[in-house]
Image (cartoon, rainbow, N blue to C red):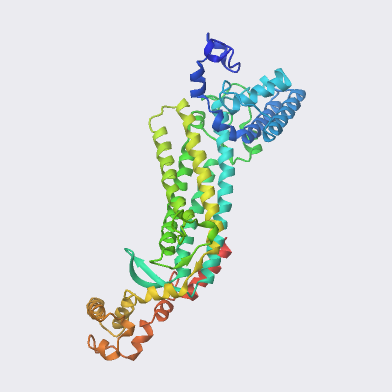
Amino acid sequence: MSAGDGDKSSNQQWGGRFSEGVDAFVARFTASIDFDRRLYRHDIQGSVAHANMLHQAGLLTEEELKAIISGLEGILEDIEQDRIDWSIELEDIHMNIEARLTDRIGDAGKKLHTGRSRNDQVATDIRLWLRDEIDNISVELKRLQAGLLDVAEREADTIMPGFTHLQTAQPVTFGHHLMAWFEMLVRDFERLQDCRKRVNVSPLGAAALAGTTYPINREMTASALGFDRPTNNSLDSVSDRDFAIEFCAAGTLIMTHLSRMSEELVLWTSAQFNFIELPDRFCTGSSIMPQKKNPDVPELVRGKTGRVNGHLVSLLTLMKSQPLAYNKDNQEDKEPLFDTVDTLRDCLRAFADMIPHIQAKKESMLEAARRGFSTATDLADYLVRQGMPFRNAHEVVGKAVAFGLQESRDLSEMTLDELKAFSDTIEQDVFDVLTLEGSVSARNHLGGTAPEQVRKAVKNAREAL
């Protein structure tokens, strides 16, 4: 008999108070087993710790403890061997595992839930799962950072135009540009590790909302599960999803950074820029235009950023009007969180695989840097060093650029006499600063684009990693 046919025993775990079974549609509508079953390993991990604590508290005999742990280990093996038929009627991963445990070992399985609720159980499972996922994502993030350092070091001398407003501004090195990407990822890594601290507290033992009358030892279970400490308030313990929101906020920033990188990669691979070449395995072609090589991986990462941003907004909206403590609304926290983790991990993996194999088209970059008067600021700085106030120097260089535009010549292509027409303080040594190489080498200070500084930054970053 289905739940909709009035089977009041459709969920033996909580059906005692009910006079009729849950409608079949409602059972499907409220069930979460289709997506929360990925928590199975962490649910079993939490149950083992809880069982050991119950035994220490005198609430389970030695035989019952052994039966429970053996039964949970068997269920874990069955799940990993795909020998489990998940039941919608049992709603979620917690009920599915507990019901199977009772089927295996009898009444001892019914004692496992002593002193806890699904409310603190799910909060514990999510924290255990997310802690592991933060560690996995951190590995991919560090792998991407290491790849960036390799390319930055290789391209420390490669000159390219630096842009503001996507207009040529000043010459920089490609290595320096990549180290700017690296700095974004440093902050991302730090945010993840800081978020992990607030994830890594144990709500287990908060029970439904008020704690429990049993003589539990929350410090024991927190330690057994690798948490830093138990949470401090039972109401907050079961209703808090700040940690998930915080992770998604950190994830949106990572994806925003990857999206900015993607935008530049897409631009740079275009025929109009022609700055870099991406490996064929990260690109696709066109069904009708045989010449096309489309940067699909960066484009898709750029597109997935909106998806992750949406998950953050979804979680914020989910929590904004909830009274304490747990509400069924919170079942909606998992799918946005799960998808954020999956998307973030996959995007980082794609970038970590792709970035080390970027090939710079050095001549194209150099030629682009020669266009757009990218050493104009260097000429202004030169005049300042000759004693001219900067605003006056700015005006002089502006006139020189206007002349260059009229003649279709860069500042470095003008003769000394032509330059002296704008200021008689200009001498032959001006050409030392008007070359692209001279411009980048002159910025030889912490954070500057000089090749020497890029190599120092790479060395320091490797030591930090």
Q: What residue lies at 51% left-to-right and 47% top-to-bottom?
A: 344
Indicate the position of residue 372 as horizontal and vertical percent values: 32, 74
What is the quadrant of residue 170 in the picture?
Answer: bottom left
Q: Residue at x 70, y 31 (%)?
A: 78
Q: Taking 278 as reference, is 155 above or below it?
A: below
Q: Quadrant of the N terminus?
A: top right
Which residue lies most toward the front here? 288
Residue 169 in the figure: left or right of residue 420:
right
80 sits left or right of 384 in the view: right
Residue 291, given in percent of the width and then of the height, sits at 45, 62
Q: Is residue 220 above or below residue 170?
A: above
In the rendered structure, the answer to whether residue 251 lies left or right of residue 375 reads right
The C terminus sits in image quarter? bottom right
- Viewer-proximal residue among 208 and 58: 208
Image point (50%, 15%), residue name: 23
The total of numbered circles placed on residues is 0
Asked if residue 219 shows in the view, the reply is: no
Left or right relative to 392: residue 295: right
Q: Position of residue 309 (x, y in %)?
A: 41, 44
Find residue 308 and report its image quarter.
top left
Is 430 or 319 nearer to us in this picture? 430
Q: Position of residue 400 (x, y in %)?
A: 25, 81
Does residue 308 appear in this view?
A: yes
Closer to the camera, 310 or 456?
310
